[in-house]
Image (tube, rainbow, N blue to C red):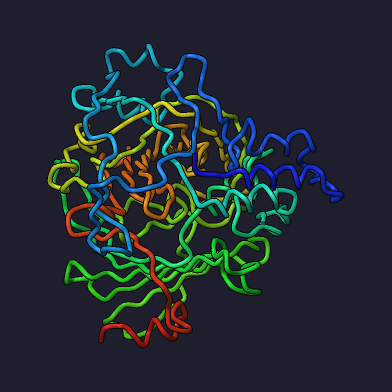
Amino acid sequence: MRYTKTIMLAAMGVMLSGHAFSADLSQEEISKLGDSLTPFGAVKAGNEAGTIPAWTGGVCAPPANYDPIEGDRGGSPYANPFPDEEPRLVITAENMSQYADKIDAGTKALMKRYPETFRMDVYPTHRTACFPDWAYKNTIENVEKPRLVGDAPGLEGAHAQVPFPMPKDGYQAMWNSNVKFDQPRSGGTQAAYLVDASGNSTLLSIQNIPNRNYYWDNELDAVPKNQPYWMLLAETVDPSSVAGTKQMRHSFTNAHERATMAWSYVPGQRRVRLAPEFKYDTVSTQSGGILLYDEINGFSGDMDKFNFKLVGRKEMFVPYNAYELWAADPEISNTPNHVNPDVMRWELHRVWEVEATLKEGERHVQMVKRFFLDEDSWSILSYHSLDHGGNIHHVMHQPPVQRYEVPMFSNGQYALYDFSKGIYSHGSLMGAPGMTGFPRIESFPPNFFTPGSMAGSGLR
C-alpha cells in the first residue's frame, strides 16, 4: 500500500484540531478521507458484485521490463503490467442492451453507428492510480481550505492537493479535473492524426510541448501571485509545412478575475499574436477541424458559459490501463471510423458524471456536455456533447495509463469523433513509436513561458 500511517495520523490531526471545518464538509465527512475513502475521495472498497476491486494503493513502481527512451527521466514507452490478460466480456451492438446502464450515450451511439466493427473488449478491473504520498497528505490536511469564488468560478485556497475530494456540485468536480495531479515540470513529444470518412489516416502534427505546473509544485506554498497555475508551449516540428508554428497557453485558478490566455506564433509572419479566440468553441487547428478548445483534455478553459451539475457516482465501462493502445503504431490503431478495438482496453470503474448545460443567452455550438471522471484520479475518461437539436455532436474517449515511474495517472491521449462529419481525430499520442511522452524536466530558463521568449526562439 502506497500511502502510509503518516497520512492516517494527518487525517486524525485535522479531525482533532481546533480549526473550523469547511462549510461544505462536516467533521464526519472529513474523517472518511484515508479511511473508507481514499485520500483523493474515491470509495476504497470494491463493489458488491466483485467486479470492481478495492483500492489498495495502485501501481506505484515500474515493472522490470520498463525501458523509457529518456532513461532515468521516465516517459514512454510504457510496459504493460497486465500483458497476458484476456477480455472477460465483449460488448457489441447485438448484446449492448444487456449492459445499457453501464455504457454512456456517446459510446452507445458509436456502437449503433458502426455495428459491424465497433466493440468493447472489457478486461478485469485494476485500480492502478497511485500518486506521491505528499499529494495524499496535502489533500487530507488542507481539505478545509479550498473554495470557489465568483460566477466563472475561480479556485482559491488550494495548492498541491485535490481541492474537493468529496464534491458537492459540478463546478467542484470539474475543478478537481482541471487541476488533477501533474508533474511541476515536464515536456516531450506527441503526435496527432485525422482519419477521414474514407478511412485515410493523415498526420496532422508532431509537437514538442514543455509544461510548467505551479499548482503541483510542492516546493512552493502557493502559485506565485498573478501567475498562471499551468503554462504550456506547443511547437510543431512536423510536417514541414507547419514546422515552427507555436501556441502558448496560460491557465489561472482565479478564473473569476483572469480568463485563460493564449498566444500564437507563425514563422511566416515572424511575430507573436495574442489569440483571445483560442477558447470555448473555436476549433483547434491541430485537430483537423474537429477538437474545440474547451474540449482539450476533455475540458479546458473557463466555466462561465455552462451550468455544471453533479449527476452522481456510478459504475461505467470506460477506457482504462490502455498500455497497448498507447504503444501501438498509428498504422495499427487508426482504423476506419474508429480506433482499432484490438488495441483498446475497457474496464468497469466508478466514475463521477457531470452534466453541463448551456446558460440562457450564451452562445456555443454545443447545448449539453457530459463528462465521466475517474473516481481514483479525477481524470476525464469519456465525454460526449449534444448539439442544439439534441443530437450527438462529439464523442471523446481518453484512454489512460498509470505512469508508474512518477507515479501519476495520465489520460492525455484521446480519440474524438465528430458525428456531423463522420471523421475522427486521434491525438496526443505520447507513447507511439518515436514519441517520448512527457518525462520530467529539472528546470526552465527564466521567462521561458512568455511571449518575448516565444518570439526569440521562433524559426525565421
Q: How many marks?
A: 0
Q: Does 34 sit above or below residue 435?
A: above
The quadrant holding residue 196 is top left
Instruction: List x then y, in percent, for residue 48.
Output: 52, 15
Q: Does 93 sit above or below residue 37?
A: above
Q: Residue at x 57, y 56 (%)?
A: 302
Instruction: List x then y, in percent, for residue 109.
Output: 35, 27
Q: Residue at x 58, y 43 (%)?
A: 358
Instruction: List x then y, in percent, for residue 10.
Output: 69, 48
Q: Which quadrant would the C terminus be assigned to in this image?
A: bottom left
The quadrant holding residue 156 is bottom right
Q: Looking at the image, which is closer to me, 206 or 66?
A: 66
Q: Does 111 sit above or below residue 250?
A: above
Asked whether the viewer can see residue 401, the reply is yes
Query: In the drawing, does residue 17 fall left or right of residue 5?
Result: right
Query: In the drawing, does residue 5 fall left or right of residue 330?
Result: right
Q: Looking at the image, which is closer to me, 148 or 157?
A: 157
Q: Residue at x 34, y 73 (%)?
A: 246
Q: Does 100 sit above or below residue 218?
A: above
Asked whether the viewer can see residue 288, the reply is no
Instruction: List x then y, in percent, for residue 431.
Output: 25, 52
